[in-house]
Image: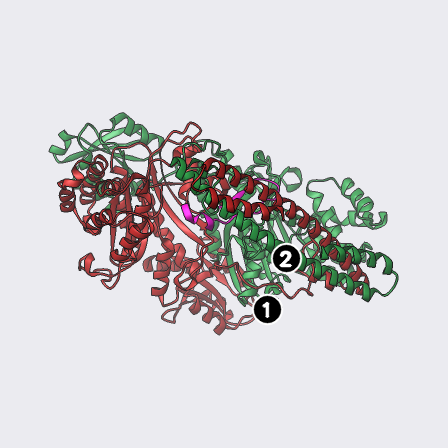
Chain colours: A red, B green
Amino acid sequence: MLARQLLLGAGCSLRRFSSASRGAVVASTMQAIRAGEEDVRQRLAQINEEVQKLLALKEQLKQLTVDDDGSGETAAATPAPGKPAAASEPGNRNLSLKTPKGTRDYGPEAMALRQRVLDQVVRVFRRHGAETIDTPVFELKEVLTGKYGEDSKLIYDLKDQGGEILALRYDLTVPFARYVGMGNVFNIKRYHIAKVYRRDNPQITRGRYREFYQCDFDIAGTYDPMLPDAECVKVVCEILAEVGVGDFVVKLNHRKLLDGIFEACGVPADKFRTACSSVDKLDKTPWEEVRREMVEEKGLSEEAVGRIGQFVTLHGGTELIERLAADETLRGIKVAMEGLEDMRLLLQYCEIFQVADRVSFDLSLARGLDYYTGVIYEAVLLGGGGAGGGSSADEEITVGSVAGGGRYDNLVGMFNPKRKQVPCVGVSIGVERLFSILEARAGGKTRTNETEVYVASAHKGLHLKRLEILNKLWSAGLKAEHSYKLNPKLLAQLQHCEEYQIPYAVILGDGELSRGVVKLREIATRKEEEVALDTFIEELRRRLLSAA
Amino acid sequence: MLARQLLLGAGCSLRRFSSASRGAVVASTMQAIRAGEEDVRQRLAQINEEVQKLLALKEQLKQLTVDDDGSGETAAATPAPGKPAAASEPGNRNLSLKTPKGTRDYGPEAMALRQRVLDQVVRVFRRHGAETIDTPVFELKEVLTGKYGEDSKLIYDLKDQGGEILALRYDLTVPFARYVGMGNVFNIKRYHIAKVYRRDNPQITRGRYREFYQCDFDIAGTYDPMLPDAECVKVVCEILAEVGVGDFVVKLNHRKLLDGIFEACGVPADKFRTACSSVDKLDKTPWEEVRREMVEEKGLSEEAVGRIGQFVTLHGGTELIERLAADETLRGIKVAMEGLEDMRLLLQYCEIFQVADRVSFDLSLARGLDYYTGVIYEAVLLGGGGAGGGSSADEEITVGSVAGGGRYDNLVGMFNPKRKQVPCVGVSIGVERLFSILEARAGGKTRTNETEVYVASAHKGLHLKRLEILNKLWSAGLKAEHSYKLNPKLLAQLQHCEEYQIPYAVILGDGELSRGVVKLREIATRKEEEVALDTFIEELRRRLLSAA
């Protein structure tokens, strides 16, 4: 009750003295909070004590009932602390048969598709000379703290089991920055493909899960302006083209330019970030609504917001850079001019990399994360146009972001013992989006294994011969399987081949074997041919090579 | 207070009536527990309410102090709920610079080696027609409960954040069984390579971590005896031979035979598993000590243990099977004969698969896990002998287990809605051991990227030309990089090539460019040659192909 009185008292003080000495109000409020906290602590301790007693009672109850009928059934229904219910006992039939909320298993078909896409992505990363690293799936909680703004509540915490306070990684950028800072790495170009975890509201139908892959490419090091930044754009373009998800555009912008625009429009410096996060909504929200938010919720002046609106609706190419460089209000603002200078270089390099037709300098691009300090990117697919569509970006409907990133020059220093900064720039490929798109498009069956030849028997009693042939095929490096039944039906074996799209079957039969031959069947055409037992491997290899 | 009175009351009842009607005591105890729980719930709700008020007060306090000095410093010192302390602020200097206990980062060199080994392992799995699947990194806690015996305490729990009770996976076998059972899968041959988590005492120097890879190959389905089982042995032999870790032996045994032996020696049925776990120690502990444990700690009779000792020290091949089949004490025991029959088939199949010289039927092999029901395997490396050593297993010193597994026919049913069993057999490759061995052996530098050509400039002012050449190389599918500095020193560029073992450099210079040529330098030999600008890509490709 103490806490409640203090709380009421403190509440009164706040109202009563708000116009009087603030110091006194603050002091009494803090005192009330401290007392309230102490009270809550005491009461929690009491409750804890009673819970312990309840648990002890339950333990007694369990003993009582176990002794009673010897089956331990009641015990299983209320497991004692520390001793888990025996799920392995046939009596326990209440096991939940599901994966945790927002997660799923990936069966062979899904995995085959994912593997194929990831292989394509990695091929591009490696073509650009990237190495790979790996970091633990969990980090000390404090490493993640303060990096994700409001989204920090989505972090999965581990239970404190008497050790460190740990949490599952939320992205790959912060672990990368920790790796670079902690390891005194001064330059590295790395990719990292791994799962990250967010306790978001899963949207299963839209393919949004709580456990999902990220696929990052970053260049850390002190280099000359825009050389690594342009290569990131090139990497994104190569990946999206190779994976083949249709037409896309890579939107480009610059945080310094955005800051410069806010400054020019009269936004106070401490509201740059919040203004930025409003602008970030422009890809999904009409300007009118963003405008309202900036004025009504974020407290920016009508006039400032109006001026911002004139800028952030612009997009284009080099001509836009020239226009902004000549802009009266921006010309005097140093950061704006620095940002424009970077953009000018970036577009020049994109031209040389032959991706100028893929990029769009877009002032509405802001990106949600706080840590960006320079160039920012976002690749979006353009609906309708299809792979070869020649129509301009304006006419297309955006179907969503498939890659994003930017420059973050001040993150690594947080993790370096001497606070040394290592400038970084990178992109994250939205592979989950790519998987979904390709999955929806696949339609037909994807091959899930790579078996080249199936060893079948035409009749009973051939399993030892099958094993011998199999062993020869494996020794020759061919991918081969057979039925694990002693005497499988020929039809069942051939059906297996068709189902798994295995290109060839070697069919054994006593008649053929006595003549020193086997039947080689091409599954797709169902054509069969006799081949000598001592040359069929060469023949198979030849056929497989010419088909590849 | 109600709860406390009831608790005391119930406590009394238990003592007073323990010899009287049990039903009444149970009923009153359960009532007391329910009432106590209700009381605790109510009090927690009250506390929650007060905590909300405290939080509101803190929010007010924050506003007050922010308004006061405008810096928000006090607010930062007591972060509001949902808004974490800003670790990104330079003031926060107490961040721990480390990975969680028992975990580590893997830099480019470690990863390159791991990737190489995993590629080799996957190649073997795929040669045997395996598909791959993936499951979430965490499972509902109850899925893992009761599967790992005493080791359950090593499971990493997640914090209950108002949802399900989750834990990180401890191995890949239980998630696989859940996948098969839950999905009504009736046959699958799959591999799964993923990290698992155990809060064990890490032994960093011995390469034992809390986060580590498992690499499993399993065959699920109702098949004829020993056909899938023999293929698992073959897979292990192929992997160990291909990875190249020297001489090894795959020990084989059978749980049914072990049970039969225990029965024949007079061990009571309920002590089979505990006897098994003693026998399991024989690879590290002398028989005398295991004997003592069985007698003194596990309460088996001296005589029974003596007879067990005569069996479990035996190992050999087919001749041992015949000897045991003829054994007076075993002959009458059904499970023993079934186990021997399986072993006879397994050794026959191993002969055909040409791995008979790699396997040893070893009665001391028991394996720790409870769920095995048939054949069990364990591959151990033999020290001293080296890859080609011809000496027998007896003379060699065992340097540790690198693969293990067995048949588990009763695990999947636990996860099937209708309790349908799907028999399984599988092996787990100890890739972390393999990594350590190969890492120690590597000595020299491993390549960490795959760059084929580095585009260098001989003097200032060539960065645009470099980008142009790079773009051509990438378009041609070659792996190429350059310095991200505008005017790097030639020496630094060539040193980079040597450090990263990049085979070729293309060196640009105004003189050469004006003549339409570039210098092509072979890094290893430092030989340089002029090549025409419009054919150098073909020339490079030719050279790279002939080197491969």
Amino acid type of the residue tagged 2 in the rendering: Arg
Q: Which residue range is magenta in the image?
A: A149-168
Quarter location, residue A68: bottom right
Q: Is residue A145 visible?
A: no
Depth check: B254 or A382 in front? A382
State the residue at coordinates (57%, 38%). Answer: B389
Depth check: A258 or B430 in front? A258
Q: Is A157 a magenta residue?
A: yes
* Label at residue B41: 2
Q: Position of residue B35 (x, y in %)?
A: 70, 61
Q: Position of residue A169 (x, y in %)?
A: 46, 46
* Label at residue A439: none
How dense is the environment of label 1, judged by Cα within 10 Å: few (below 14), some, or many (20 and up)?
A: some
Which chain does the numbered disc 1 sit on?
Answer: B
Depth check: A428 or A265 in front? A265
* Vertical placement of residue A507 versus B382, above or below: below
Q: Is residue B393 left or right of residue A65?
A: left
Q: Position of residue B424 (x, y in %)?
A: 59, 61
Q: Is residue A145 left or right of residue A548?
A: right
Which chain does the numbered disc 2 sit on?
Answer: B
Q: Is residue A356 left or right of residue A197?
A: left
* Label at residue B417: 1
Q: Is A473 a magenta residue?
A: no
State the residue at coordinates (40%, 68%). Answer: A523
